[in-house]
Amino acid sequence: MPHGHQIQMSKTRVALKSAPSRARKRQAPPARKQALSREVILERALELCKNEPLQDISIVRIAREFGVTPGLVHYYLGGRDQLTSGVMNGFYRALLQNVSPVTGKWRADVEHLFRTIYKAYVRYAGIVAYLMSHNRFRLFQEVGPEEVDHGASFFERTASCLRQARLDARNTAMFAHLLLQHVLASGYQKSSRQLPGDHHDFLVSRMRRADSQERPDSRFILESFATLSGDAAFEAGLQLILDGMERDIQRNGSSRG
């Protein structure tokens, strides 16, 4: 047998011996992608809002999350407005699920409602960032005939809680506005780390450079101011507003008498 033919047969035997081992190495099946739907897309977008501003979450961003083309997201969802309104509606729906029914005790009900709102704003920093800088879809949402506008339901629950105090429409509206603005600002400051307590060392070091004789009042409140937390500031503001409602209720009661 020619020497070259022997070499070729040897290579063939090696290849045959190694073939079974290659056959045994089966590749794992590709990960199954989550089935897309409008609800799935909006749930993921709301989840992203825990860390990203809603206004920064685009159709392209959502497509990357699912590993699909932007056109497929458009197919299920529509455009930018449908994304924003759908996320806001989902946020209000989730918020209202954590609100207990009214008890008839107006102050306790208002405290519970606004503490729940505050916690939701802190949890979804991207929602509160959107609300602080945009007007569209802040409250009322674009919904289909079979859908519930949970933003409108949120406003109705707020009005219902406050109306239990039996103030007139003007004062009820004013306190609703004050409370909504307070909880929004408090949630934003907490989630974006704008509170004095978040910058304690910097504030203390800068103020201690100042002459205590020149700025005695600043030095007086310095340590207490520099340790203020978001939760404490929110609660103090909430109680101040509700104390104002109490005073109005008492004045109205006196005038009726």
Image: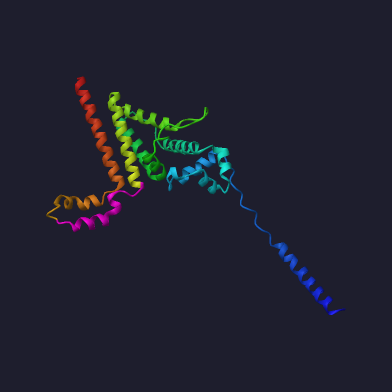
Q: Which colour scheme is used?
A: rainbow
Image quadrant holding the C terminus, namely top left
Q: Where is residue 114 in the image (x, y as percent from the top left)?
A: 34, 37
Compared with 129, 107 (above or below) is: above
Q: Which residue is drawn at 22% across and 30% down?
A: 247
> Which range of residues does the magenta coloring cover?
191-211
Residue 12 placement, left or right of 119: right
Residue 133, visible in the rendered structure: yes
Q: Residue at x 28, y 23 (%)?
A: 168
Residue 60 painted magenta: no
Compared with 20, 106 (above or below) is: above
Quadrant of residue 5 within the rendered picture: bottom right
What is the count of numbered marks? 0
Residue 4 placement, left or right of 211: right
- Furthest residue toward left: 213
- Furthest residue toward top: 257
Residue 225 placement, left or right of 94: left
Compared with 214, 56 (above or below) is: above
Q: Which of 228 and 3 is in front in this view?
A: 3
Q: Position of residue 79 (x, y in %)?
A: 52, 38
Q: Residue at x 37, y 44 (%)?
A: 122
Q: Where is residue 28 in the image (x, y as percent from the top left)?
A: 65, 57
Quadrant of residue 132 within the rendered picture: top left
Residue 166, visible in the rendered structure: no
Q: Where is residue 73 in the image (x, y as percent from the top left)?
A: 56, 41
Q: Is the magenta stretch mostly helix, strand or loop?
A: helix
Residue 199 painted magenta: yes
- Furthest residue toward right: 1
